[in-house]
Image (cartoon, rainbow, N blue to C red):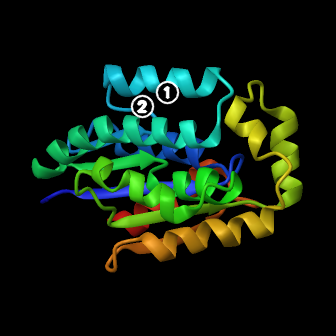
């Protein structure tokens, strides 16, 4: 694949989604850079329907893991096409979210989650993985001011953040491609614009 695949991972309230929105502004109208997110993404009707199903319904963690993988199978087909065209694709969450949230946090087991995602990846692998972190105090402040909290946000509200970050990073380093770079961005004391600028410096 000629293009570059970049993903952003991290616990809820770590600031990655806002930073990605600012990064998109920095790229402006560059047609060679495509932003997407999981679950769903790239206007894929099936993947988007699965996203809605996940967020609106309480379900068994294994069911949830299969739904994420199903959405990912649809999503990665389109990502692969874009990469083959030489595009840069920047994605908010990917495989490693499933490995941590369903595999570790919800107890399914990361090996089981990885195995059910193998075919869903369609050979798509990240070149750069950004991992976003934030202090416990700043996380709590953001939780209080966020207007809308979805079901999955609530799942992670009570976890020990330090332990969660260590487990999450372990999933990334265990399953990432050998040549993929992992970059940590702590948003505790920086703005979303500053985080986006850090990302851009690393990407280019």
At 67% from the left and 52% from the top, the residue drawn is 191
Mark linked to residue 167: none
In this view, the residue in front, 143 or 30, is 143
- Name the side, left or right, on which 204 lies relative to 158: left
Left or right, residue 10 beside residue 91: right
> Is 177 on the left or on the right of 53, as rendered?
left
Q: Quadrant of the N terminus?
A: bottom left
Rate crowding at label 1 as few (under 14), some (14 to 19) or many (20 or more) other CA atoms within 10 Å.
Answer: some
Find residue 128 and report its image quarter: bottom left
Task: Give x and y (percent) for residue 66.
Answer: 47, 40
Q: Which disc number belongs to residue 40?
A: 2
Residue at 82% x, 55% y is: 159
Q: Earlier in the sequence, mark 1 or mark 2?
A: 2
- The residue drawn where x is 40% and y is 59% is 115
Work out whether 201 lies above or below 33. below
Tell me the tag on residue 51: 1
| Whole-number angstrom distance, CA of label 1 to CA of label 2 | 5 Å
Taking 160 as reference, is 168 left or right?
left
Could you say which is closer to the camera, residue 12 or residue 175?
175
Label 2 element class: loop
For the residue labelled by badge 1, is the local secondary structure a helix, a strand or a loop? helix
x, y percent for residue 132: 61, 60
Q: Position of residue 86 (x, y in %)?
A: 13, 52
């Amino acid at each position: 694949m000629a293009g570059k695949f970049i993903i952003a991972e991290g616990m809820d309230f770590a600031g990655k989604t806002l930073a990605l929105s600012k990064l998109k502004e920095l790229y402006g109208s560059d047609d060679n850079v495509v932003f997407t997110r999981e679950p769903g993404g790239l206007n894929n009707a099936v993947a988007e329907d699965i996203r809605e199903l996940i967020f609106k319904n309480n379900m068994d963690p294994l069911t949830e893991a299969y739904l994420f993988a199903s959405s990912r199978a649809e999503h990665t087909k389109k990502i692969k096409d874009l990469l083959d065209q030489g595009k840069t694709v920047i994605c908010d969450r990917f495989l490693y979210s499933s490995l941590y949230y369903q595999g570790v946090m919800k107890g399914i087991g990361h090996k089981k989650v990885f195995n059910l995602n193998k075919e869903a990846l369609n050979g798509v692998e990240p070149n750069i993985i950004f991992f976003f972190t934030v202090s416990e105090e700043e996380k709590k402040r953001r939780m209080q001011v966020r207007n809308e909290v979805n079901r999955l946000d609530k799942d992670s509200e009570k976890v020990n953040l330090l332990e969660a970050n260590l487990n999450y990073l372990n999933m990334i380093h265990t399953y990432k491609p050998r040549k993929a770079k992992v970059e940590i961005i702590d948003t505790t004391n920086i703005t979303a614009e500053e985080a986006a600028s850090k990302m851009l410096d690393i990407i280019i």
